[in-house]
Image (tube, rainbow, N blue to C red):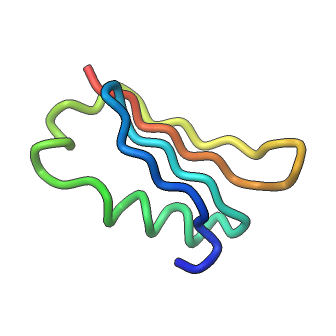
Amino acid sequence: MTSVRTAQLLNNGLRLVGQDLKDVLSALANSINPSIEKQILYIMIDRANTGEWLANVGKK
């Protein structure tokens, strides 16, 4: 997961940013535990103009 440079646990969700989609998805999977899983409202994956991958998980 060397390409994931940002992993923030926010009050309303989780945000990850990285260059490699596979690393971002792996970090996302490793960051979600059973208590967070029950609160997930959405998961959004997007590619920024800079080429970085953004993963956002919104909680209920």
Rendered location of residue 29, percent (x, y): 35, 61
Q: Residue furthest left?
A: 35
Residue 9 or residue 54, whichever sits in front: 9
Residue 21 left/right relative to 9: right
Which residue corresponds to the image point at 39% horizontal and 28% vertical from the top-left?
58
Q: Residue at x 84, y 55 (%)?
A: 51
x, y (%) of residue 42?
40, 29
Q: Is residue 39 above or below residue 30?
A: above
Location of residue 4 in the rendering, given as x and y in whole percent from the top left corner: 58, 66
Q: Residue furthest right?
A: 49
Residue 31 appears left or right of 34? right
Residue displayed at 62% across by 53% down: 17
Please give left or right for residue 34 compared with residue 52 in the image. Answer: left
Count of marks placed on residues: 0
Q: Residue 21: which quarter of the image?
A: bottom right
Find residue 24 and report its image quarter: bottom right
Most extreme residue toward the bottom is 2
Residue 20 vertical placement versus 2 (above, below): above
Q: Residue at x 56, y 56 (%)?
A: 6
Q: Which image quadrant: the C terminus?
A: top left
- Horizontal side of 39 relative to 44 (left or right) equals left
Point out residue 59 in the picture as x, y percentages from the top left corner.
30, 27
Q: Is residue 28 above or below residue 14?
A: below
User: 7 and 58: which one is in front?
Assistant: 7
Judged from this view, the residue extending furthest toward the top is 60
